[in-house]
Amino acid sequence: MSRLSLPRARTGSAALVSAVAALALALTGCSSSDDGSASADGKITLTVGTFGTFGYKEAGLYDAYMKQNPGITIKENPTTVEGNYWTALQTRLSGGGLDDVQALEVARISLATSEDLADAFVDLSDAPGVDKNDYLPWKWDQATTADGRTIGLGTDVGPMAICYRQDLFKAAGLPSDPESVGKLWAGDWAKFVEVGKQYQAKAPKGTAFMDSASGLFNAVVSSSPVQYYKDGKLAYKDSASVRTAWDLAVKAVQGKTSQGLKMFDTPWQTAFSKSTFATTVCPSWQQANVQQFSGPGNKGKWNIAQPPAAGNWGGSFLAVPASGKHVDEAKKLVAWLTAPEQQAKVFQKVGNIPANQAAYDLPGVVGYKNAYIGPDAATGLIFSTAAKAIKPAETGPRAGDLTGAFSTGVLLMEQNGKTPEEAWNATVRQIDSTIQ
């Protein structure tokens, strides 16, 4: 799922509890928006609330579904930034007006499956054609409640690779083919940082090895089965992956191998077209950003290699509110959109790797090569292999906010000149005061 902004810490624990209570009340007590009602001729309009790039329009899936189901009209209500979507969703829910289908980002799924909210969504395990075994087991489990109901079907996952500029690698005296590049840092993110030093020693003028040390931090954490939470409790201070990720981000900053950009902001987007960095951590959804922001002039200059370690960054679900006017039809739509054939088409169009593992053997996935990024690289094979290697991790209800807090902390070093100790302490203070 394309992310145009990292989630940010927004509320304290008391405010979160109030928001959850209001969300649960609204979900169970209001109906979907007027756009979801049936018309006089019996036709039904289904509304779909999304954020970022789900790829359904781009892949022509809405049109295909409406052609197969003449009595259905689909209207998508998109929001660019997930953080804005989630905030607006809570506001809309408090005042009434749900979409028939609501997208949920992985960082929110723990909250959605909690005791406070779970009953607000219908069980999708019995939706037409849905087979639990088709989905990645850990992805299915993420959306399953304590009492065994599955309230979201996975749309995509975020297996990581490394997107790199093969022309800049050549200029810096480094290997440039995907297999050789992947071997440079295989098995350890610390090797990735060391390759950055090698690159920087002979770097083309005005370029840095990586775009952002905050991206590196998140990639390292995302590669670990133990992240910010342990056994349902916030445990980031004692997390080995958090400390390792922080130390590597510090090395990248101090070694000047990072350009110090804030991911997804305008300067970061512009830097793609100006060719000022050589690598970016590349979850499958990142392909769309690389292509969009690099522009046609850089076609063929990017390539894709295996990451130092398998991990998941991002991914989403489709859920159906129990209070919707057309729950049965919404369930049918969600089941169809998340079926392997449809997820394969989305992958080809916007790069979102399927959560439905039955799609991995389809030619449109395993045999896919991105004509813009690494036209000779086995793009589909790289991402599907990485997806299968992901180890399940406990996310916790505030995982997105924690990611945002640490990203801000790294930026304090990169953009504000704070020492590692000052930046760490500022991050801890923010988390302790706003996230519990």
Image: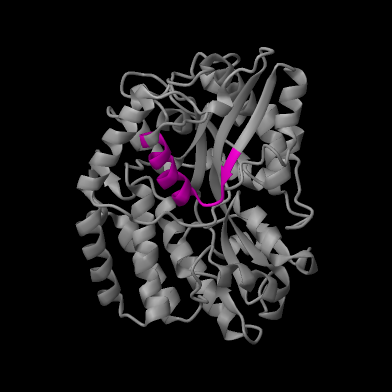
From the top left corner, tell me how far across and down residue 338 is, in percent.
Answer: 60, 28
Which residue is found at the position 54% from the left and 46% from the top?
Answer: 158
Q: Position of residue 115 (x, y in %)?
A: 27, 27
In-front residue for pair 65/313: 65
Tell me the quarter of the picture where residue 142 sits: top left
Residue, far bottom = 205
Looking at the image, which is closer to me, 100 or 307?
Answer: 100
Could you tell me if residue 361 is visible in this image?
no
137 sits left or right of 369 in the view: left
Q: Position of residue 385 (x, y in %)?
A: 60, 42
Does the magenta portion include 85?
yes
Q: In the figure, 39 relative to 138: above or below?
A: above
**In the image, residue 302 above or below residue 26:** below
Q: Is residue 244 above or below residue 27?
A: below
Viewer-side residue, 13 vs 92? 92
Q: How is the image coloured?
A: one colour
Is residue 345 visible to us here? yes
> Residue 406 location, x and y as percent?
35, 62
Q: Quadrant of residue 411?
A: bottom left
Q: Main secondary structure of the magenta part?
A: helix
Number of numbered discs present?
A: 0
Magenta residues, as a range? 77-94
Q: Residue at x 69, y 13 (%)?
A: 41
For the point 43% across and 19% down, the residue is 122
**In the displayed image of the protein, which residue is found farthest to the front?**
40
The residue at 24%/40% (across/down) is 18
Decide if residue 259 is on the left or right side of residue 436.
right
User: Is 239 a magenta residue?
Assistant: no
